[in-house]
Image (cartoon, helix red, strand yellow):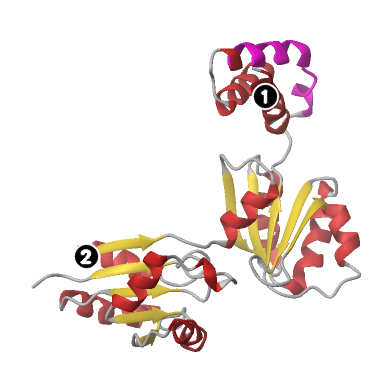
Amino acid sequence: MTQGTLFLVSTPIGNLSDLSARALSTLEGVSVLYAEDTRHSGTLLRHFGFRTPLRSLHEHNEASRVKEVLGRLAAGEDCALITDAGTPTVSDPGARVVAAVAEAGFRVEPIPGPSAVTAALAASGMQAGRFLFLGFAPRKGRARDEWMSQVLDSPDTVVLFEAPGRLVDLLRDWSERGSSDRRCVVCRELTKLHEEVRHGTVAGHVEYYSGESVRGEVTVVLDGKAGDPARETVDEEQAAIIAEQLAGEGRTTQEIARRLRGEFGMTRNRAYELALRAAARK
């Protein structure tokens, strides 16, 4: 008997038009659909006229669903896993099931699509060659302190989620920890009717959102920590010359920036600025 496949289907984070043709055909063709919230996913299926059977799979019953999913796959049934919005298992349940399915030798096939993480990162204008995603902030205690240190000490761009009612507290906490001038982008209700993408600094967002009633899904992008101040005094004139030479040789922007950072000890952002400028002049 042919074994079944577990499909991980990314669903819209707001705009239903973002559901891909491949995702649509997959949701229609599987034997059963496992969803974080069957009521929420039922609305999605009804919108597209699907009658695919729905089964719940959330943080409280995921462990008990493993045996059921494995049984269906062994019987030759194709199954799909979705979350309320975005990509399954990214700050959502499902990883335990996926690991068990893979370990049992069944095929796991991702159907890529919408993600608040990558949408916010793209809209931020910050470097995305390397980034750190940290989900939701712990609410208090040592866990929150350690999480905050991880965020604020990261040299790479950080992407995270936050509940609307806790956004201002998060921004104030960053400001009080010495990061008030750090570049920050707050994305709210991505792809939805009242979408908002605000560029600015941590301090600027504290001032703005302190007087606002924040609503909807919130994704925050924070610029990475600047390099060692002792290394920031560099010969930018010479660095610009090297950047133009490398651009003339056909080197990519990433290659030029990497060379400048290594040779001159420049911050990541400044190295990319010079690399982009050189690439535009070649």
Amino acid under disc 1? Ala
**Left or right of residue 171, residue 68 in this image:** left
Residue 89 — which label?
none
From what the image shows, is residue 228 above or below residue 124?
above
Q: Position of residue 126 (x, y in %)?
A: 68, 43
From this view, report whether residue 177 is shown above or below residue 187.
Answer: above
At 88% from the left edge and 54% from the top edge, which residue is drawn? 204
**Left/right of residue 69 with respect to residue 221 in the rendered view:** left
The quadrant holding residue 220 is bottom right
How packed mark 1 is, by other alpha carbons closer than 10 Å (few <14, some 14-19, many 20 or more), is few
Residue 156 visible: yes
What span is in magenta?
A: 229-246
Q: In which quarter of the image is residue 70?
A: bottom left
Residue type highlighted by circle 2: Phe
Position of 188 compared to 50: left or right?
right
The quadrant where residue 147 appears: bottom right
Instruction: Where is residue 60? Give x, y as percent.
Output: 46, 83
Decide which of tag 2 and tag 1 comes sooner along the chain: 2
Quadrant including the N terminus: bottom left
Q: Name the residue under label 2.
A: 106
> Which residue does the image show at 83% across and 47% down from the upper left?
178
Foreground of the two, 52 or 107: 52
Q: Position of residue 159 (x, y in %)?
A: 63, 54
In the rendered image, which residue does mark 1 sit on?
Answer: 280
- What kind of secondary structure does the magenta stretch mostly adopt? helix
